[in-house]
Each structure stands twice: as C-alpha cells, then as structure tokens.
Amino acid sequence: MPFKIYVCVKHVPDSAANITILDKTRIEEKITFIINPFDENAIEEAVQLRSKVGDAEVVAVTIGKPAAVETLRSAMAMGADRGIHVVTGDPPDSIATARALKAAILADGAPDIIFTGKGSIDSEGFQTMFRLGAALGVPAANNVASFRLEGRTATVESELEAGGRAVIRMPLPCVIGAGKALNKPRYPILPDIMKARKKPIRTVPMESLDIGTPPASVQLIELRPFSDRRQAKLIPGPVEKAVEELVRLLREEAKVI
Amino acid sequence: MPRIGVFIETREGRIKPAMSGVITAARGPNHELYGLVLDGRAADYKAQLQAFGIHRIVDVASPTGPLGWNPDTWARAIALAMREFGLEALFGLTSAMGKEVLPRIAAILDAPLLMDCLRVDVEKRTAEKSQFSGKTTGVFKLNGAHCLYGMRPNVIEAIPAPTEAKIDAFQAPVTEGALIVEALRLEASRGVDLTEAEIIISGGRAMQNGDNFRILRECAEVLGASVGASRVAVDAGWVPHSMQVGQTGKTVSPKLYIACGISGSVQHFAGMKTSGVIVAINTDPKAVMMQHCDYGIAGDLFEVVPILTRQLKASLNHG
Amino acid sequence: MNKKYDAIIIGAGVIGCPIAYELAKMGYKTLNVDKNSDAGLGSTAATCAIIRAHYSTEDGVAMAYEGMKYWKDWENYLGGVKDEKGLAKFMNTGSILLKSKGHDWRKVKKNYDAVGVQYEDWSVERVVKAAPVYDLHEHWPVRRPEDSEFWNESTGMLEGALYCPEGGYVNDPVLSTHNMMRATQAHGGEFLFNVEVVAVRSEANQVKGITLKDGSQFDAPVVVNVAGPHSFKINQMAKGVWEGCNIKTKALRHEVMHCPSPEGYNYYGDGYHTSDADLGIYYRPEVGNMFLIGSEDPKCDPKVYPDPDDFYAGKGGAGEDNQLSEAQWKAQCYRLGRRVPTLRVPNQPRGVVDLYDCSDDWIPIYDKSDMKGFYMAIGTSGNQYKNAPVVGAMMAELIDACQKGLDHDANPFQYKLKYLPRSFNVGFFSRKREINTNSSFSVNG
C-alpha cells in the first residue's frame, strides 16, 4: 500500500482581481482565479514528503465549480499525481466543506497525512483544516513553519504570535496547515505542465457524497463593496515643518498618540 | 438572559490590550458576560475585567492545576466550560492564539464560527467580515446551538462599563491527547504581535535593506509601536515573514499605521485598510498609499522618519 | 481673457513631451495638458521601452536607428538639464531577432543594410552560446495553450538570428518622460496636470484653443493631439478632423507579463532583448531577475478594444479589463516556456495591463489635419517609444513648416535626420494614406 498524501486546494480569485458584486451574494466570476497561494506551500511539502517516503502518492482534492479544475491542474503541474474534484454550485461553508472533504478522501483511500494551506485568501475562514481533523478524529496543526516525519510521528513547528513557535508532535494520520515559512514552492516548468494535462482527475458531484445534515451553518447574506472614506491630506512644506504639523494632527485631530 | 463567553487572552500575566474592545463587542442590553481565563491568574484580572463589564470570571484549569499551552486541550476545556455554563456565544480575538483555539472549539462543538469579524450582532446572530482581500465586506448569519466570533483586534473601541465580577473555578477533565506540545520557542519573538499592536510603523521597497529597518525600530520605540513590512521587503529577505503585513502576511488594524516607502499594492491594503489612522511617507506623491491615507508627507523616509522620531521624543517628553 | 500660447500639446507622455521640447527650443511658448498628475503617467508608464532597430520598412528601421542614437546620447539630448529625480538610463543588452517564419527577417536584413545598422548574423549555436537557456526548436505557427496543437513536439529548428549589439531598453520610461519635461521647462514650456480636455475650439476651420472640464479655456494657433489611447476622442472633438482621417486609431488592450528567470541564470545581468516571432512574443530583462514578456499580437489571440476612460477608471466590462487575465498569462508564459524550457511559471499572474493607441495598420499618424493649426502624433501602436525623441524633432519641424505655409498634403515635408545621413518623407505617416500593406500589423510596426 503506498503512503497516501492528500492535499486540499482551493480555487480563489487572484488578490489583484477587481471584485464586482452581481447580486447580494454573488460576484462576477469572469476574473482571474488562481490556486490559493498557501496551498502552493502545502503541495510543495507533500511533493517533498513523497520523495522522502518513496512509495507514496500525492492526491490533490478541491471543492468548487467546474472551473476549479484549473486549480487541480496547477496542483498537478507542481507535482500532485492525480486529482479529485468535488463539483459544487455556490461555495459551501467551512462546516459542509470539511464534511465533503472527509467523504471524498475516505471514498478514495485511507489518508496517511493531509496537507492544506493555512487559510484561503478569498473567504479567510481559518477553520476548515481543524474541522477536517475533528471530522476524521485526527489531530491538526496550523500555520506550520517546519515539518519532519519520523516513522509514524510528525513533528512540526507552528507559528505563534510575534515570531514565536510551538513544537508540536502528532501521530499519523494528521492534518497540516502550511504557512508561508514552511518552504519555497517550486513552480512548474513547461514539461511539468504538459504532464499535468494527462494526469487523471476524478469528478465527484457534491450531492453524491454522504455528508449528513450539518447541525450548523454560516450563511452569506450580503456582500457590500468596501468603502474607503479616507480623505488624504498631504502635508506640504519643508520636512521639518511638515513633520511638526503631522505630530500636531496625530495628537490633536486624530488623537492617536 | 443570554450568557455570552469571552475567551480572555493574556500574555505574561497581563490581559492583552485588544481584549477590552472584544469585551465591549460582546456586551448587550441584558447579556451576562463570562470571561474565560486559562492561565491560572483569574484573581489578578478581576479589577480590569469587571471594569469592562464581565460579570463572571471562569478560572478554567485541569484537575491538576493550570493548563499549559496546548491549543487542543485548551479548546476542549473551553468547549466543556461553554456547556457547563450554558454559554450560547463565545467571543475571542483573531490573533495567533485565537486562530489556534477558536476554530478547534468550533470543530469540537460543530458550531458556526466567523473569524476576523469587524462587527457582530449577537441577538440577530449576524456578523461582518472582510472578503476578497478586503475589497468587499460580507454579512453572515450564523446558525447553530453555539455561535463563535473571532474579532479583528482593535476594530471595536473599548468602552468601560463597570460592574462587579464573581470568580468561578472550573476544572475541565482534559488531558493531553494525540497532539503534544513539546516545547515553546519564544526566543525569536519580539514584543507585541503585529496583529494586536496599537501602533505599527512599516517599511517597504524603499527601505533598500534589512539594516535600514533600524530607523523604523527607533521610531517604534518612542511610539511604543511594532515594526511591520511589505511583501517586497520580506521577499527580498530583509526582514522575517512574521513581520509581513498584507494578503499573505498579517491582517492588522492598529489605531495608527505609518507606511514608510510602501507604494500600496492591493495585497498590502488588504492587510491594513481597516487601520484607524493611516500615515504615508513616500517620495512619490502619486503612490496609491499616498492617495488612500489620512495624512501624507511627500518625502524621503530616510529624512522624514529620523525627524519624526526626534520630534516625537521631544513632544512625548513634554506631553 | 483666455491665457494664450503659441502651441498647446494635449498629452504629456513620451511623445507629447519631446514635441513640446523641440517647439520650445524653436521659440514657441508651449503648454502641455494631461489628465494624469505628472509626465509619463499614462500609457507611457506601462511601455516596455524597448530600443531596437528592426522594423518592416526601411524608413521604419532608419527612424528607430536614429532614435537609438538619441537614447545613447541622452544627457546631451536634454541639453544638460538637471532633473531632481535623476536621468533615465539606456540599458544596452543587445537585441536578438530570431529568424523565423513569423518574421520577415530577410526584409529586416535588407533594411539594416540599406540604413547601415550595425548587426551580426548569428547561427543557432552562436545564439545558444550567448543565451544558454534558449532552446531554438521551431514552434511556428503561434498557437494558444487552449489549442491542443500548442503541445505538439517540435520537429524543426530555427535558422539563427540577427543580432543588433546596439539594442536594449530604457530602465524607466516615466523618468525619461519626466526628463524631457524638465528640459522643456528649461526653455519656458509650461505643463498643466490633472486636467481633462472637453472641447477643441475652432473658427472658420482654424483651431483656436481648448476648453477644460472645469470650464477654463486656453488659446493657441497650434493644438497638437498626443493623447495616446484617448487620441480618437480628441480627434472627434475637433470639427471634421476624425472624419478627415483615412487611417483611424483606437485603444487596444495589451498585457505584459513578468516571470522569474530560471534559477541559476542571471537574465537581468546577462540576458538580451529578444524578438521571438516564432512564438509571437518578445522579452527583455526586468528588475528582480525577471523575464518581461510582451506579446506580438499573433492572429490567434483575441483583441479587446475598451473605452479608454472606462479602462482607466477601473470599471471596464466585468472588472477584468484592467487586470491581467489568467488565459493570457498562461499564453505568454507558456510560449516563453517553449524557448526557455527551464522557466518556472508561477500560478499568480504578475505584470502590467495597459492600452496601445493602435492605428489601422499599426503605423503611427504624424501629420497635420483637415483643420488648420490642428496636428496629431497618434496611433503609436505600442512601437514608438524608441522613436520619441525623433518624433519630437520631426513634428516640431513639420508644424513650423506648415504654420509658415507649407501644404504638407500636396508636398510632403522631408525630414532630415540628425544622426543618420538621410532624409525621409513624413508623408509616409499621413492620415490620408491607404493602409500600408508592408506593415507587420503588430507591435513590430
């Protein structure tokens, strides 16, 4: 039995994209989507682990609209062996996502380890990896900055506040949320991209998965454009005078110092 | 009378400054507020917690004493406390610690959780948070037996509401499970975490190298500020990733954000656009940051910042 | 009383500034007006600022080669003027034109010989020696990655390249424009920023001046349209001018990508500007050891013509108009990946999107108009940055000659180049011309 590494990836709007709200809860999706940047670190770590373990397989899993297949292709170009695409309409919340990931992974095989990014840059929910761990009954560590596997024990460093770290030990299987400091993702060269075009993707309709009836939900009821009410005040004059005025404004007008 | 819990984050025997705003956000006309303290020093915090309206302080510990840091045991202990005291909602901070603990509690309880909230309506069970790199604000409805809210630090102004608090001890029967914290490495940690800082001074591309961040640190010392950086400065290896503000770094919302030589990419704004007051110092008056700040000085940061440090030193001494 | 000038130039980009500079040197009292807050902040800010000599016509080559001489002699051209921001720098990387079916390089070679352009004929081995990361397999015709044939293995090889050692790029196009503004100001020229022209006033078919959005008016017997992607809108404001052009201009959306150089290769320090028509792209080094990848607008690529005002206001179409698109990111990076097989392509697009002021035949219009005193230097089609100082001198002389009575339409003005010993017929750039079928109909001009 090969060692099974699953990597959960998400198809998200490019952070540079203009977001246009269409109706109350939907955005115009004719914009550039990319693989969630933190998921790149997850893939990289999975691929490095595969080469250390030897007899191992990296499976990328995504939940999303049909277009999310592009993100699976990106993950496979970066080294994943194959993909599972759980196809949905509107994006499910973290609770349903974790249940669907669990169902899709267990239907595929018994995971030895699961990697995710430490968060997604679109919804920034910061919770799916913990819910997935709880659903599977396995430990989870997030914002991981270093990872080591000895036998069936994973030792990770999880980033705490202000640059501090906690050294955490967990038995396999476990869920690892990759942070930026974990590694430097190696982007694909054209031959990798060509190979990825031929790697298999299994498509699973969300409705076909048994996720039960979640007891709770988080429901988006309205999206509003962020309005910046700031009026930029450029302080003119020679530097010494301008700084003097700035200090006065911060003290008397803004009252922040 | 709804019972609302607040996960009180502390550091070295002090309640984190951003907690007062979180307690303020959790208050409601007839809420009974429970402050959950896990470091074993509940009594030390009584005066401060009751000043902001906490009615009951729950001293959460294991049967053998205070719980050492382990996000997994902490989460299980808090989940048990929530059941024990019938808390229908829990507030916390979207800090490094909050991001470790709150989602674990939500996972254990199968409860809805919204992190990085800008505003919460406990009665309606709705909350707002940024979506899509801060370009939109989403309003969410939470459905479930318990609702969890992680507040973005410093977005809610702290307003005192004095009351009298009572301390309850709660012994949670939890022991370390599969997840074991072997060690804490805090040697690299410096000062207040960016996400909780009240004042931040950040440097970007114009800093040119890591050594030059010294002039920001000098200014930060005078202001009691933390030092941040843009992605350019981190990618160039000038400063560690833990100092990065922005999309793939930290989301911050200090009272005062001073951007030095940062042009203002969408990704950087995503991490700091809800700051109270934004000051931009940039040689290019057309830089995006200069157009979306509150106060801007068009000038070379290497000239402006030392003058600012000197003037602040003088003015804070007299003030 | 409206303020009076000898010449008003609409636009303070890389073409508008040198025209003002040359007119000011001739004694004209000039005013440049621009929507942006400083010189060179419109589409000039997004130019790749390539300095190369290969064009599809002999005059095109001559003009570009002449332009190269100016860039190499920048300080002198500016008359020793000081700019507090410093001077733009010509980065002399050398310029490789790959011989391929996508580019009629024989024509270029003939033009090089006729003009006297310095060049070397390089074999495949010589190219690879200079740029060891290049793989010179042939991939013609240009395709998109969505087309499964894009992925076919190559069977042939390219023939080599024409190498022009004098080529390169300018490191900071905005700064170069700012430099020319400072030089203009040193001769009394004035600049007005953050203003929008809403009317071009005339009387009895003689231009009188312009009116700005805030209602203020400025008068001049000469008004020059150098409005870049907005040029067609300005022409439409001047009675009869747009109708009098046989060649029209419009704003074309264009994306330029920044992709990191393969590890271990210092493209920024050691690389060459390269025109690669076999793959429909060109590339040059960019700060941060990046490949800057431009597109030669192959036929298979979609062309989008947004409204320039909407585009710059950031609300074009579905919100993607002024952001890089994933499909084009892949197209341009994967094409380069064919030439540089060790290139690693990030998932997140990085680069620049802006507008070309594109003419029907991708050749500019440097001309008078059907309205007396109204001139135009438009339709630069993404390929005139390198010529800007030449265009400045040529337009100034053309304007001066026409104001003194020359009938340029009947007897086209002959412009004498300053560095090269030749003249050329400015009628080549006439608005009345038929579409020039010699053109490459691309950024190559």
Image: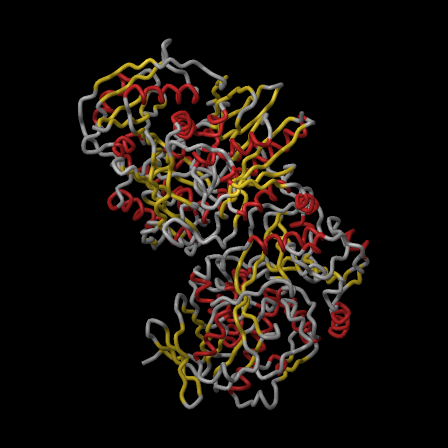
- Could you say where residue C77 lies in the image, as x and y percent from the top left? 58, 68
Q: C417 left or right of A244?
A: right
Q: Nearer the viewer, residue A230 or C266?
A: A230
Q: Is residue C337 visible?
A: yes
User: Taking C435 as reference, is B89 above or below it?
Assistant: above
- Could you say where residue B235 lies in the image, as x and y percent from the top left? 54, 40
Dividing the picture into quadrants, the one containing residue A257 is top left
| Quadrant placement of the C terminus of chain B | top left
Residue at position x 51%, y 64% in the image: C43
User: Taking C249 as reference, is C51 above or below it?
Assistant: above
Q: C133 left or right of A176?
A: right
Report the colour scheme: secondary structure
| Quadrant placement of the N terminus of chain B | top left
Q: Is residue B223 visible?
A: no
Dividing the picture into quadrants, the one containing residue C396 is bottom right
- Could you say where residue A198 lies in the image, as x and y percent from the top left? 68, 44
Q: Nearer the viewer, residue B302 or C317?
A: C317
Q: Nearer the viewer, residue A139 or A164?
A: A139
Q: A139 left or right of B128?
A: right
Dividing the picture into quadrants, the one containing residue B127 is top left
- Could you say where residue B258 lies in the image, as x and y percent from the top left? 38, 43
Q: Nearer the viewer, residue C292 or B156?
A: B156
Marker count (numbered): 0
